[in-house]
Amino acid sequence: MATDQTEIRDLSERILLEFEAYDRPHKVWSREFYSSVIVIAFLVSIIFYFIEGVMPVVVIWALVFMLWSMAKTVPQMVRTILTTWGLKSQEKTYRYEEMTVFWFETKWGTRLMRINLATIPWHLVVVIDPKKEEELKNTMLERVIYQDPPVTWVDRALKWVGEKMPLE
């Protein structure tokens, strides 16, 4: 006689970890940086104008404006919550099933957690509280693979160009 023992699991959403951090990394650029960017954009605009016309010039100056506006806009504090279902940030839930790998890195003195997703937007960048990094890593490791991305030739080339031709 077989007894039917079914396992009852709690599928309700529970908060595992919660912290507040900025919504994006931020750096205050110097006046020299802006003048370098404007000079480079002007020279590239002249070249592209004679090659292709007005449209690439408009795109270049739109990117310069975006750089300026992002630098002048102060990031906001957001509450990030790690639950049993996934990561909640800015009223959006990213489920663990969507996450493929995650890793940590530092950019402009800010600690970041980067997550590759299997769905759109494909990549998620979360500014984290450095005091909660170890706890966050241990909680994420239970559900998602931790893997540092390999350094490619493009990464090495961009680093080399940044060292040889600093904009500041």
Image (cartoon, rainbow, N blue to C red):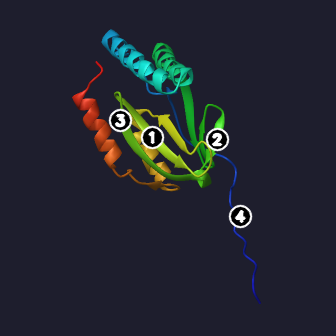
| Amino acid marked by disc 1 | Met
Q: Tell me the SS state at disc 4.
A: loop
Secondary structure beneath label 1: strand
The image shows residue 23 at horizontal and vertical percentages of 52, 27
Q: Residue reaching furthest bottom? A: 1
Image side of residue 48 versus residue 39, left or right: right
Compare marks 2 and 1 and give the one earlier in the sequence: 2
Give the mark nearest the N terminus, 4 or 2.
Answer: 4
Whole-percent x and y of residue 82? 56, 42
Asked whether the residues under the numbered discs 3 and 2 touch, taking CB atoms below 8 Å apart as contact, a structural biologist would say no
Closer to the chain start, of discs 3 and 2, is 2
Q: Which mark is residue 113?
A: 1
The residue identified by callout 3 is: 106
**Mark 3 or mark 4: whose residue is earlier in sequence:** 4
Neighbours of disc 3 within 10 Å: few (<14), some (14-19), many (20+): few
User: What residue is pinned by disc 4?
Assistant: 8
Distance from Cα at disc 3 to Cα at disc 4 = 42 Å
> Which element is circle 3 on?
strand
Residue visible at 22% across and 30% down in the picture: 164
**Distance between the alpha carbons at the discs numbered 3 and 1:** 9 Å
Name the residue at 51% across, 48% down: 116
Q: CA distance from mark 2 to mark 1?
A: 16 Å
Residue 84, percent from left and from top:
61, 49
State how far apart marks 4 and 1 are (Cα).
Answer: 33 Å
* Mark 4 touches mark 2? (CB < 8 Å): no
Mark 4 or mark 1: name the one nearer the start of the chain: 4
How far is mark 3 from mark 2, CA to CA? 24 Å
Residue drawn at x 48%, y 21% is: 49
Of residues 164 and 1, which is closer to you in this image? 164
Q: Nearer the viewer, mark 3 or mark 4?
A: 3
Label 2 sits on residue: 93
Q: Nearer the viewer, residue 156 or 61?
A: 61
